[in-house]
């Protein structure tokens, strides 16, 4: 039996990944990081779909801030559905289903989180074929991971029977305590809830209409606007916030009678904590997972991950140590789920260590904060890719001094346009419209000294931007 319908993938990439701080930040969460190999988790999710689903049939649902900010390079070549605000998985999936039907098609939708790891790709493809055949019959299909041990960090799916490749779902259960998880694994008909699904666009929209009319009504308002010729992304930007924030599990799957599960073992991990990163990582003879500039002497069962400075450890075990240029995380193995508590404290304290890294990627290149601890000034290193330009902008609270280290800068300052080369500098007064461009063939590298009484990134008024940022 062959699959007749058009198949399109929808990858959900809007999460915050707080449990993988300090690598995962609000502006660059874990789905855009390289935690296992040379690809980001998002890129690996797209890659593993080939050859079953080509990249042109892959859509990524993500936050608008990611697409125009640090994750630009990860997203620019992909079809994007941009959320102006977070509304959980049910509105994201509903919006994607409605958009995929705009051309009159009723495709099969494969819905995947962007931040999971699957090591056995053939097993994934085989289970996907089974799920697609069931979805063509109108079922809402979810993938259940055959549990390897009684994990209390996952939700569970109970199947009504175990005598087929596709089972009706009896119920969904939230993360259980250890005793309950042990009973689930012993029963043999419980599976970890993977958050991966296959269904027809029409099937999920029909269930949303039945069980979540507040979401469906907003979709219908959007559809009227689309059919009137309005730009679909602008309509989403205006109306998406009117949808309630709710997960697809609560919104549709738990009350629906059409949900079935395909059990699968495929080397799956949601990489939801540093303990999970240790589990999937290559290890030495003492079960240590070492990455970056690290030395481990007489250490056991630990994870040491360095991005810049040396991590040197002697005689310790069961420790997680993660270093970035502006933060160090230390915790015992088994406690890494609590890292989100650190992020909560950082948010309350009003700092930036939860929000972005010292090196921040932008569509035009990147910058690194060299010194922002002193009052009244900030020091940055800025690199601009060939052919790229920053927005035409001004600042109300700071002036800027630019010194070119390598490459050639084309600088707009007020009504003047000038060329600045290596060892030369210029000065941008407060409130002066200015733009930095790299019209050369090599990266432009420069040092920026900001001076003022307020030096945060939101002191930018943009007048023109090639990347569409406000």
Image (spheres, rainbow, N blue to C red):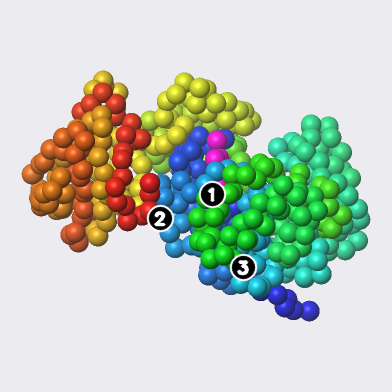
Farthest residue in the front direction? 228
Task: Determine contact: label 3, label 1, CB under 8 Å.
Answer: no
Q: Earlier in the sequence, mark 2 or mark 1?
A: 2
- Residue 99, compared with residue 240, is above or below; it is below
Instruction: State the residue position of label 2.
Output: 73
Q: Secondary structure at mark 2?
A: helix
Residue at 81% x, 41% y: name it. 173
From the viewer's side, name the closer residue of 213 and 261. 213
- Separation of marks 2 and 1 at Cα, in angstroms: 26 Å
Where is residue 135 drawn, in percent x and y? 77, 66
Q: Secondary structure at mark 3?
A: loop
Instruction: State the residue position of label 3.
Output: 102
Picture quadrant of residue 57: bottom right
Picture disc at residue 238: 1
Picture quadrant of residue 102: bottom right
Residue range (magenta): 14-18
- Would you say residue 17 sits in the magenta stretch? yes
Picture disc at residue 281: none
Q: Earlier in the sequence, mark 3 or mark 2?
A: 2
Residue at 52% x, 50% y: name it. 237
- Local crowd at mark 2 within 10 Å, few (<14), some, or many (≥20)? some
Residue at 16% x, 35% y: name it. 429
Residue at 61% x, 41% y: name it. 272
- Residue 329, compared with residue 132, is above or below; it is above
Nearer to us of marks 3 and 2 is 3
Where is residue 438 drawn, in percent x and y? 20, 55
């Amino acid at each position: 039996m062959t699959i007749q319908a058009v198949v399109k993938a929808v990858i959900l990439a809007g999460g915050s990944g707080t449990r993988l701080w300090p690598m995962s930040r609000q502006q660059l969460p874990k789905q855009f990081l390289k935690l296992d190999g040379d690809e980001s988790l998002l890129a690996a999710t797209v890659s593993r779909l080939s050859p079953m689903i080509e990249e042109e049939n892959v859509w990524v649902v993500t936050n608008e801030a990611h697409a125009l900010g640090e994750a630009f390079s990860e997203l620019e070549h992909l079809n994007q559905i941009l959320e102006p605000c977070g509304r959980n998985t049910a509105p994201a999936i509903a919006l994607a289903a409605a958009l995929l039907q705009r051309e009159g098609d009723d495709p099969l939708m494969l819905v995947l989180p962007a931040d999971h790891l699957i090591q056995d790709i053939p097993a994934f493809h085989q289970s996907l074929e089974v799920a697609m055949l069931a979805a063509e019959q109108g079922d809402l299909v979810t993938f259940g991971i055959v549990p390897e041990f009684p994990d209390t960090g996952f939700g569970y799916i109970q199947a009504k029977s175990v005598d087929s490749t596709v089972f009706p779902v009896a119920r969904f259960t939230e993360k259980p305590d250890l005793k309950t998880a042990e009973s689930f694994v012993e029963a043999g008909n419980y599976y970890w809830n993977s958050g991966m699904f296959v269904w027809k666009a029409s099937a999920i929209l029909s269930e949303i209409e039945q069980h979540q009319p507040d979401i469906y009504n907003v979709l219908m308002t959007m559809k009227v606007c689309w059919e009137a010729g309005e730009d679909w992304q602008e309509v989403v930007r205006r109306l998406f916030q009117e949808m309630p924030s709710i997960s697809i599990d609560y919104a549709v799957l738990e009350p629906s009678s059409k949900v079935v599960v395909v059990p699968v073992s495929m080397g799956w991990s949601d990489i939801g904590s540093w303990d999970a990163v240790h589990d999937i990582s290559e290890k030495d003879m003492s079960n240590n997972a070492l990455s970056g500039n690290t030395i481990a002497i007489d250490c056991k069962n630990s994870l040491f991950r360095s991005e810049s400075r040396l991590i040197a450890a002697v005689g310790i075990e069961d420790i997680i140590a993660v270093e970035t240029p502006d933060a160090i995380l230390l915790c015992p193995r088994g406690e890494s789920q609590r890292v989100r508590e650190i992020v909560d404290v950082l948010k309350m304290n009003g700092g930036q260590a939860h929000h972005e890294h010292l090196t921040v990627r932008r569509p035009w290149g990147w910058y690194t904060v060299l010194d922002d601890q002193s009052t009244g000034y900030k020091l940055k290193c800025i690199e601009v890719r060939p052919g790229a330009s920053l927005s035409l902008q001004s600042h109300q609270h700071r002036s800027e001094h630019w010194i070119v280290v390598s490459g050639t800068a084309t600088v707009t300052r007020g009504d003047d346009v000038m060329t600045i080369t290596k060892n030369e500098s210029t000065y941008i007064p407060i409130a002066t419209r200015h733009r930095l461009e790299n019209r050369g063939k090599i990266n432009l590298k420069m040092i920026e000294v900001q001076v003022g009484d307020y030096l945060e990134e939101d002191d930018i008024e943009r007048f023109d931007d090639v990347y569409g940022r406000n």
